[in-house]
Image (tube, helix red, strand yellow):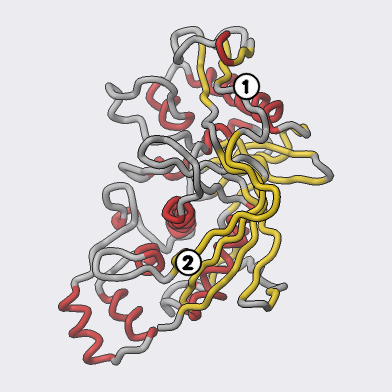
Amino acid sequence: MAKKEVLVEFKTITPLWTGDAWQNSSEIRPSSLIGSLRFWFEVICYFLGICEKEDFNNGTFEKEVNRKEFEKCLVKRGNTFEAKIECLLKQNIPLPSIIFGTTNWRSLIDIKDIKYLGDYCFGDKLNLPTKICFNKSTYEIKENRDCPPKSNNNWSVFFFAHPYFYGKLQVVFKVEEKILESIFYPLLTFMDKYGFWGGKWNIGYGRLKILEVKTGDKLINNWEKDTFLFSQINEEWVDKKLSDLLLVVTNFRDLTQQNSKIRILEDSVSNSSFINLIKKLIKEKSKQRANFNTNKELRHKIFGKTGNTRDLSYVPQGSKILPFIYYEEQGQLKGGFLSIAGLLNLEGENNE
């Protein structure tokens, strides 16, 4: 198998945070970016029917490859890329594990290098507060020391991670050539339009815009692909368009529906300032969250929960409705919400 270097230049729309074990983000961690790619690819595969609920294990679509059976299979079928994929499929290895690796099988997508470009910043380029808080009754907004130390019965507190990355970066991916057109470019297209990178998505972090894609010195002008060519991996699968995955809704209530679509509520608010925009989005989400006060468990599952969750075994990691800042034009950010509430049909789901 041969991997090709693909150079992707990104620009932050919102802060990028890839914290380490000590919750510091002094560099962009390749593992965090690959983890984001894998998470969204798993969402895509599940919602498009490529992965089944039965394939979901311990928070991911992953299954260990039986090395001996794999080697036996290759003896019969040869050592080509197609033969290896066929042998993995024979073991019912989920597609995300085939693309991003699992025990006894290496990922088909790696990151070779990350370069920071131009006037980038690891710090607080946007002069964000350390925290904001909303009164649960009046929705009054406060910042920093005017907020309580943590969420309580009257206030919901949201913390803004510092430092974070803001600016331009180039990521050098190494991608198996035979999945460039079928999987990688469609996934890159999805991430550009809808995906989140790194962590802290519940406060709007992690939205990146792709500025250019190159292989070597050659600019790739047609990297944007709207169709996943799953049939090139398994002839029994049907190719799927991004439009098969997405549903644009017109009201917030529709975001809470738990079916196999990524639901998007566009253009709720706009503002040139990230902090002003995210305050409006979080405030709106907090208001909508109150409509679920009669069902605390469902409210926590859909909207997430701030503060202590140790005694709430049912609470998944992270909200399933994310503040979605998706467009930038002449300095104007626009934002709405993106819902992956359909993941609640899985058990033990996990996202950052």
Q: Does the image show residue 254?
A: no
Please give left or right for residue 209 compared with residue 89 in the image: right
How far from the left and from the top, in percent, is residue 277?
70, 30
Circles 1, 2 touching at the beta carbon (< 8 Å): no
Checking the image for residue 112, the label placed there is 2
In the foreground, 124 or 155:
124
- 192 w.r.t. 272: above or below: below
Labels 1 and 2: the sequence-earlier one: 2
How far from the left and from the top, in percent, is residue 197?
53, 48
Q: Secondary structure at mark 1?
A: helix
How far from the left and from the top, in percent, is residue 122?
58, 41
Badge 1 amino acid: Lys
Residue 189: name its quadrant. bottom right
Residue that extends furthest to the right in the rendered view of this protein = 330
Q: Secondary structure at mark 2?
A: strand
Residue at which label 1 appears: 283
Residue that extends furthest to the left in the rendered view of this protein = 68
Q: Residue drawn at (38%, 84%), measured in percent from left and top?
A: 81
Q: Does the image show residue 343?
A: yes
